[in-house]
Image (cartoon, rainbow, N blue to C red):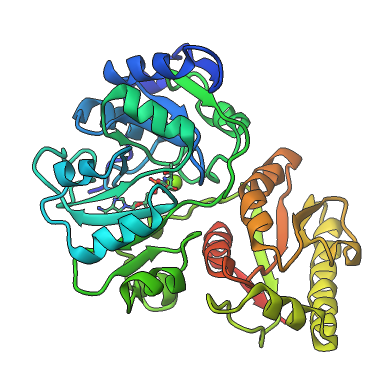
Amino acid sequence: MIIMARSSAMNETINTIIKNCDEKGAISKAAVILRKGGLVAFPTETVYGLGADALNPEASNKIYTAKGRPSDNPLIVHIADTYAVYKLASHVPKKAVMLMEAFWPGPLTIILPKKDIVPSETTGGLDTVAIRMPSHPAALDMIRQSQLYIAAPSANISGRPSPTTAGHVISDMKGRIDMILDGGAVGIGIESTIVDMTGDVPIILRPGFITKAMLENIVGAVTVDKGLTDSIADIKPKAPGMKYTHYAPKGELTIVEISNDTESDDNCTDEHSRKNHSSAASYITRLSVAKKINDLISEKKQQGFKTAVIASAENAHLYNCENILIAGEATNGETIAAKLYGILRECDDIGADYIYSEAFNHGKLGNAIMNRLLKAAGQRVIKV
Ligand code: TXA
Ligand code: MG
């Protein structure tokens, strides 16, 4: 049975300290709180994390309570030095070392068999542990000063979009955790790539900034978890967190895309996408998507609902909607990734009942962006 973590502490309000990362003494204060078993939200290069001492089961449990997270959903352990991997994992295969050397510090999480010192509270009962070395200087400094390994999921209430600014963390976590370190807006905006390194062939459990092609460049063949690609087949994703509805705004989000759109492709260079996108065929495609979205909006408006559109910069002018949220240029995956979660939160701020989004599946980040957008949409897609 999955227990949604909850305790009497949920009803108590904690006095949350909020400090800028650069403020003198802020990081050492965070380190002291972590050493006492407290909770600190901190910036990473991907999204904000909600940190606690990974080897302290009570501290890990507090994370589940603060987030309202199901207890079977394991946490990622954040480290600041490579040697920590050997303290946490019972076996570190050569390919894992190659990936660590290539991408750490950075947005890559590696799953390895765990050592006994990692409590099952941190790994959601699994005998493996997820490990990542973030590249954000404040995160590294905090981990080093605490002299701990830091368990940290994204610092959002379970099911909401991951936080990409301290403001997002404040709105979800103020009063629930001990401290928030404000490091401004994060750089990448979607969570790390997760790779299972427990078998011979690495398996991507969650796509992210480090793509399949980048991983294959270092270690050869890499596969993708079937639970990610087969949405129709009832295959459970290997990363427990990937089975939950996630990143979702409160309104109903639907993706509208062209039925014969090219699949997103790691090898698709930005130049290639740009050429594709600027073709005449592409223009007709954009018009058909816009027409469908405009029809849906006018139907919902007539029924008295509030609507919003998530659009690329090039297409924004095609929509007839009071709330047009621009994710960035369709070919600029980096901007779209950085803005996506903020936009999903904006949909809540607006109070949108129905949200329609274009598909953003071009370029090397297309896979990762569409993975998050499809989850936020509960896999609701209309093809035109
Ligand atoms: O970029 C990130 O990874 C951010 C920042 C804060 O580091 N963290 C993050 O954590 O996204 P979280 O808890 O929101 O997502 C962790 C994912 C979940 O889907 C979880 O199920 C999976 O990692 N996971 C953790 N440990 C695992 C394990 N041992 N085996 C398989 N999946 C695991
Ligand atoms: Mg999360």
Of 28 and 115, nearer the camera is 28
Q: Position of residue 137 (x, y in %)?
A: 47, 34
Q: In which quarter of the image is the C terminus?
A: bottom right
Between residue 152 and residue 188, name the one nearer to us: 188
Q: Where is residue 2 in the image (x, y as percent from the top left)?
A: 26, 47
Which residue lies at the image location 77% right of the left edge and 61% below the top edge? 311
Residue at coordinates 27% horizontally, 34% vertically from top-left?
A: 149
Is residue 9 visible to the viewer in this orientation of the structure?
yes
When asked about the image quadrant of residue 5, the answer is top left
Number of numbered discs on residues: 0
Location of residue 14 in the rendering, given as x and y in whole percent from the top left corner = 44, 14
226 up-or-down from 314: above or below: below
Nearest to the observer: residue 154 or residue 324? 154
Residue 239 appears in the figure = no
- From the viewer's side, name the closer residue of 295 and 120: 120
At 21% from the left and 43% from the top, the residue drawn is 83
Residue 32 vertical placement versus 250 (above, below): above
Describe residue 325's horizontal placement relative to residue 240 as left or right.
Answer: right
Q: Where is residue 84 in the image (x, y as percent from the top left)?
A: 22, 41
Looking at the image, residue 257 lies above or below residue 31: below
Residue 249 vertical placement versus 263 (above, below) = above
The residue positioned 25% from the left and 34% from the top of the image is 54
Instruction: Give left or right: position of 269 versus 77.
Output: right
Q: Is residue 3 left or right of residue 14?
A: left
